[in-house]
Amino acid sequence: MSDSTRRDFLKTSALVGGGLLTADFAALARAALAADPVPTMSIARWDEAELAAANLTAAAVGLTEAAIASLGGMDRFVNKGETVWIKPNIGWNRRPELAANTNPDVVGALVRMCLAAGAKTVKVGDHPCHPARQAYRNSGIAKVVEATGGRMIYLDEKRYKDMPLGGEFLKEWPVYLEVAEADLVINVPILKHHGLTGCSVAMKNYMGVIGGNRSAWHQNMEACLADITRFMKPRITVLDAVRVLTDHGPQGGDPDDVEVRGIVAAGTDIVAIDAFGATLLGHRPEDIGHIAGAAKRGLGTLDFASLKPVEKILS
Amino acid sequence: MSAVQRARRIIWIRRSVQVVVLAAFLYLLTANRPADGAAPSAPVDLFFDLNPLVMISSWLATRTLAGISLLGLLTLVVTLVFGRVFCGWFCPLGTLHNAVGSLRNQFRRVVKRTEEFSRWQRAKFYVLVALLVMTALGAQWVGVLDPFSLLYRSVSLTVLPAGDIAVSAMSNGIYLADPHLGPWHLRDLTEPFYRWWQERVTSTELRVFSGTSAVFLIFAAALLLNLVRNHFWCRYLCPLGGMLGLVAARPLLRLTSDPAQCNSCHKCTLACPAAAQPEKPDEWLATECFGCWNCVGSCSNQGLDFKWIPPLKKTSAGTVDLGKRRVLTSAVGGVAALSMMRITPAANAKTFNPALIRPPGARAEPDFLQRCVKCGLCMQTCPSGGLQPTWAEAGLEGLWSPVLVPAIGWCEFECHACGQVCPTEAIAPLPLPEKKKVKIGLAVFDTTRCLPFAFGRECIVCEEHCPVPDKAITFEMRDATDREGNVSTIKFPRVDPERCTGCGICETKCVFKDLAAIRVVSANEDRHPDNQPILSGGYSYEDSGNEAGETPYGY
């Protein structure tokens, strides 16, 4: 990391020198951007030809590790001694094969990487729609997290605190204190169809860090999700599209609605990740109200291709 | 070793057994908290299986042994040999009475008058007769007074939630205020305890029950009556004690006294918790005695001892004369009570209460009430907390039986715990795939509240939560016009009665918290063909994407 920083510095200095000589500041800015070696998005895909025969557990782990490595490794996001909250989607009391919750092996891989990067504690938790104990267990996430050294946290209804979202629509809303206090929150959604919003990706996943009458958000999902996203200041988002729920979301329940895609994407721009997810489900990102709305509000870009995602194909 | 020394040793063994059994009762009660899987794995209804009153009354009510545990026979055999030791050594409610009684004895001198046999102790036999007569006519009201049902119901529905609220308030208060001295935070101590409490004792979601003040008051009264008489409940009221007393009329192990040694000091009278007349040679009452050995241990002159007596020998025991007329009166009382409970339209299936939503697998109402012992196991294990004790919904006959209140919690799709833990199969122990098919009611919209209908706003929360894989709530795109005349096309929800199981999660999660805009009624419940307004046919559950026969929770 320090090496590349020094190299960046030298490169930038050279460019600045050259730029000053020619005094072409616009070109300078373009060049500085082009020279940026820190990727903002990565996509890891399992070779489609091999997908049917793949061991999905190993694939999910490999894809997650590859996506994070392409992004510069977990060290870029986690500092020694920090507390990390991993926020998968554990909304439902459903088995992993039904693709209603984040893939447990993706979560497990992230827990391991955070601990390896020096995190003091890695907490994993969600505010499920179904009973937490059953959802945590049936999703397979509790077992993997316990095995990898993370801690499953049951959210306590008394520990949501009204927080000043200062949003355009929501001025204040109860957010889970422990999540807000964490040094880093890693948003790990699963890609799903959604009956109201068309698709549920990362921004929608933030509904699991809030309390209050969550159901009311459906009346203005676009503004509410933009407000919570701005409040959460996402630094890293990891999209699980190993299995994807294509219909009857967000809860699903029918194996026929599940498609194995073998993709994990990671990035620093949550809107770009959401837009990428939308395209995987066959939508145009601009057609998905809350994703387009977030881009309009300056929370990120719909044009994820402009971020030049680092692509890797595994098999 | 003298009789007194041996008795004192036995008394200590008895106390240890009592503590262990009470602990086991409470452990199995907490093991019945909402499970990580589809049902608890521990034998949480073991105590009810051992209860001969539940066994006999269930058999009397249903005339079948199907679904009824025969472990109660073991208790009866033990009683035939040793007398009412079940009451003195085993019954966890008896142990609590013991504890309260000992506490009382610390502060008040025990006087002979209150510890001598009273003819009112026959009341428990009349209670038993009345209850069994009711049961034989099909009303299982035994559970209201059965000691295990009473204790289980009281602890799980009132004491444990109260404890949970106290622990949660203290832990959360310390967590939020975070008092600390340098690097030492008080919450580093309280948090691990709170986590243990939630994960091993109660539940991660607070579960509270409505209409339980009566449950608690009766429990408190039963304990406080020890201030009037030691073991008041066991001596005067307990129908299980009455039944075991009748079985124990001529046990093999009997109290014998040596009149030559008796100086009429009445230490044994004062020591006897059961008022079983140990002081009267040849008039010791086996129907009352708990076999606790206190009297033997209290005798300064070694005048008392328990001895094996051949079963047919009629000496060495007094008898309690129940009186034929009194027994008959009790039976008539039972018939009267039953008739009075049944003089309602609902009890005769003339009307159906829309709020009486029974758990999945519950038998048709008369059959259900023949089996339900109102113990509260199903409510204690329900993960959403939606199973509540009835108050008036099922009439007096169904008092404290389980009803699903979707405003509080729903019937979880991937769960069949209530049927698995029910000790009498009032709720059938359906395999999970079978349980998922059961219709317990029907969701209906209140279009004066539902957002798209009443306010022209989009919502979809009910559809999102509907657990049926291909959704029992679907949408119709319709135009909604706002006050400025702008037209937008939004989703209007509709219930498909063929697919709706009445699980109630739509009502629980509805954005309206005072009175949901979608509510579940008992209509369409599988168990009552007369309560099914929707003509059904052509829809096969297996076509819906549900996987019949598959076992979930592989993780």
Image (cartoon, coloured by chain):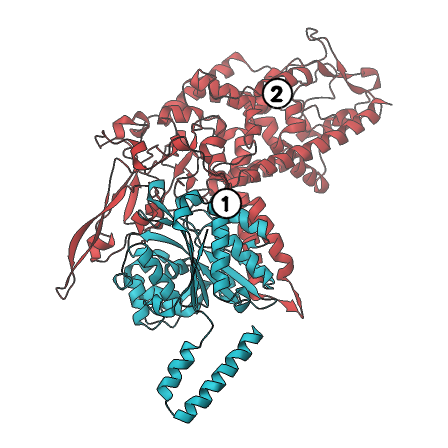
Chain colours: A cyan, B red
- Please provide percent x and percent y for residue B221: 55, 38
- Chain letter for mark 2, please: B
Asked if the residues shown at circle 1 and circle 2 are in contact, with their CB atoms under 8 angstroms apart, the answer is no
- Chain letter for mark 1, please: A
Of B35 and B273, which appears nearest the observer? B35
- Please provide percent x and percent y for residue B427: 43, 29
Q: What amino acid is at disc 1?
A: Arg
Of B157 and B439, which appears nearest the observer? B439
In the image, residue B227 sits, relative to residue A25, either above or below, namely above
Q: Residue at x 22, y 32 (%)?
A: B533
Q: Would residue B295 be visible to someone looking at this image?
A: yes
Point out which mark residue A137 bears.
1
**Do marks 1 and 2 share a chain?**
no
* The furthest residue to the top: B312
Q: Residue at x 18, y 51 (%)?
A: B477
As drawn, is A167 to the left or to the right of B47?
Answer: left
Residue on which disc 2 sits = B75
Provide the secondary structure element on which disc 1 rests.
helix
